[in-house]
Each structure stands twice: as structure tokens, then as C-alpha cells.
Image (spheres, rainbow, N blue to C red):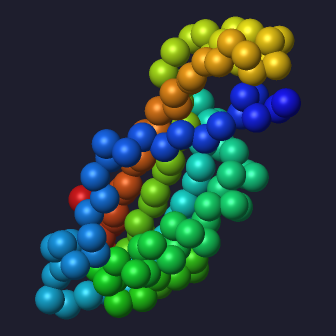
């Protein structure tokens, strides 16, 4: 009865780039990784905790850095990644309410947008 209330959909048009296609410098450097998930620009600690290990693993597996740490590293290099979940429409609540009210008989779809910001501070603290 509740199957119509919540379904997950991931947009398949986003192209995933294989780690083998990354441009990597000859001399790899260690980096400190800082990650935060936000909802509408506000820190979301629960989502950050849930995704942090996955993000760390993905950066490590990229092969771009010699070491990925959550603590300061020699050379003071920092990679900061912020993932912000933003609504794409203003009427998401009303669509969800109607779907729930009809026990899923009147289906609806709501899309979420994500803005990912990555900042790299090199050893000279110059933002790249």
C-alpha cells in the first residue's frame, strides 16, 4: 500500500568519469580532505556522516593524491568538497502531500538538484 509514497530515482544523464581518465600530475602530493553535505545551504551533519567515508574512498581511489587524510598534512594542501542539496521547484511539499493523501494513487515526481563545490588549496595556500 505504501509503495507509491516513496521511490528513488537517480538521473542517468550525469556522466561518470573513470579514474583512469583523470589527469594526474607526475609528482603526487598528500592532501587533507574536508567534506560537508548541506541541505539548502545549511550543514546537514547526519548526511555528512553518512557520505563522508564514501567521499574519502572515492578521492583515495582517484589516484590523484599520494595520501588522503582527514588531518593536516605536510605542505598544508587542502581539498574541500561541499555537496549542497537544493530544490528545483517550490511545490515539492504540495506534490508529496497529494501523493500521500491518495495513498500513492496520484503519483508525482519531484527532482532534487545538487551543487558540488570543490576547492583545492595548494601548499602556498593559493586556491586552484
Rendered residue at 68%/52% (across/down): 47
| Viewer-closest of 97 and 103 | 103
- On the picture, is 84 further left or further right than 21? right
| Viewer-closest of 124 and 79 | 79
The spot of residue 53 in percent (x, y) is 61, 72
- On the picture, is 125 further left or further right than 91? left
Rendered residue at 82%/19% (across/down): 103
Residue 99 lies in what quarter of the image?
A: top right
Reply above or below: 12 against 4. Answer: below
Q: Quadrant of the N terminus?
A: top right
The spot of residue 105 in percent (x, y) is 73, 16
Rendered residue at 73%/51% (across/down): 45
The spot of residue 93 in percent (x, y) is 70, 15
Q: Quadrant of the C terminus?
A: bottom left
Reply above or below: 42 against 48. Answer: above
- On the picture, is 81 further left or further right than 121? right
| Viewer-closest of 2 and 18 | 2
The spot of residue 67 in percent (x, y) is 42, 88
* Residue 75 in view (yes/no): no
Numbered disc total: 0
* Residue 125 in view (yes/no): yes
Amino acid at each position: 500500500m505504501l509503495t507509491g509514497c516513496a521511490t528513488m530515482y537517480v538521473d542517468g544523464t550525469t556522466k561518470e568519469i573513470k579514474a583512469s581518465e583523470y589527469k594526474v600530475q607526475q609528482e603526487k602530493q598528500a592532501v587533507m580532505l574536508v567534506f560537508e553535505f548541506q541541505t539548502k545551504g545549511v550543514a546537514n551533519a547526519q548526511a555528512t556522516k553518512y557520505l563522508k567515508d564514501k567521499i574519502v574512498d572515492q578521492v583515495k581511489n582517484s589516484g590523484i593524491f599520494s595520501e588522503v587524510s582527514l588531518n593536516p598534512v605536510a605542505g598544508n594542501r587542502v581539498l574541500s568538497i561541499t555537496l549542497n542539496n537544493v530544490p528545483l521547484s517550490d511545490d515539492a511539499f504540495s506534490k508529496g502531500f497529494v501523493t500521500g493523501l491518495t495513498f500513492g494513487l496520484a503519483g508525482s515526481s519531484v527532482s532534487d538538484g545538487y551543487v558540488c563545490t570543490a576547492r583545492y588549496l595548494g601548499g602556498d595556500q593559493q586556491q586552484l
